[in-house]
Amino acid sequence: MEKVSIGIIGGSGLYQMPELQNVREMPVNTPFGDPSDAFIVGELDGVTVAFLPRHGRGHKLLPTELPFRANIYAMKLLGVEYILSVSAVGSLQEKYAPTDFVITDQFFDRTRARAHESTFFGEGIVGHVTFADPVCSELGDILEASCKTQGVTTHRGGTYICMEGPAFSTKAESNVYRQLGMDVIGMTNLQEAKLAREAEIAYATLALVTDYDCWHEGHDDVTVDMVIEYLNKNVRNAQLVLKDAVKRVAAKETPNQYRDAIKNAIFTAPDLWPAETAKKLEAIIGKYKAS
């Protein structure tokens, strides 16, 4: 299987950019089932990148239906060391206006039905990964620098609250999230970040603000048409930011800082690992068998 060190998770506009060359599909099978779709592999200025359509091409999967484990495990099988995740979010604060970009650095979990898609561990192997700082600061620096080159209004830092969906927030929920100090709201990135850390892959989110959720007086309640309109306005800027960021990641002289993230996170002694589970997690924990 071809090895790719940089992965991007996002919508169709991100793998249909005109600068992407030598495009090919790459299906990846995992012990956790099929990913959201086949990977789209191509070159940006000579750098090979693997794109994954988060909701499948044609946007066919609900947030709760996403095969998060398969998506991240497939990235691991491809040799991905860095994941840049791009997603639409609602703004919970006045300062984050529609079409702004936010490079979040924290997450807050409000999902209810995704426990089985939030960790690779279980089935006889217990792991507790450190997750106080859930995103890679080095990738955050790169995304911030790339946004500046494109002149995009960008905010560094902030908390992404991950809700279940698929319905958008009620006004009561939206106002409570604001009172709690949350910054943006989305439905997908928390599980990706958790699993990426367990897979020892550096991860960062580039959040594209499409609306003010439903709390903002003077703005209509969020509608699908509104989200799509602002998302389409953001797509080209996101493409250009990613093109620049990919070059910066490829030129990095320091290694992925999370390459040993689970070295001390596995509580179950290797000689007690069930053979079936160990085989299932080989790509992640195989190097720790003799620990």
Image (cartoon, rainbow, N blue to C red):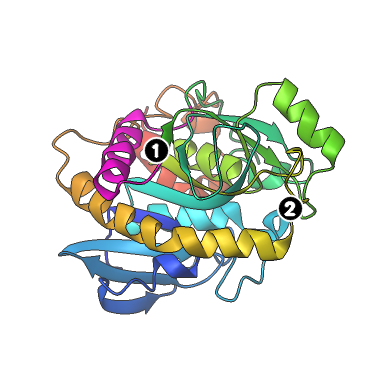
Three-letter code for the amino acid on which mark 1 is drawn: Glu
- Comparing 263 with 186, the one in front is 186
Residue 195: image x %, image y %?
52, 42
Please identify the quarter of the rendering in which residue 120 is found.
top right
Image point 26% across, 38% down: which residue?
145
Where does residue 32 sit, x and y in percent of width and height? Answer: 58, 58
Vertically, is 74 above or below 150? below
Residue pointed to by mark 2: 222
The N terminus appears in which quarter of the rendering? Answer: bottom left
In front: mark 1 or mark 2? 2
Extent of the magenta region: 134-153
Query: Where is 251 relative to 9, above or below?
Result: above
Residue that mark 1 sits on:
200
Question: Few, some or many C-alpha atoms within 10 Å of disc 2 (few <14, some 14-19, many ≥20)?
Answer: some
Is residue 172 or residue 55 the one in the foreground? 172
Disc 1/disc 2 C-alpha distance (Å)? 36 Å
Q: Is residue 231 left or right of residue 285?
A: right
Q: Is residue 54 visible?
A: no
Which element carries disc 1, helix, strand or loop? loop
Q: Considering depth in this image, is 212 or 73 the residue closer to the camera?
A: 212
Residue 144 belongs to the span the image colors magenta: yes
Q: Is residue 100 visible?
A: yes
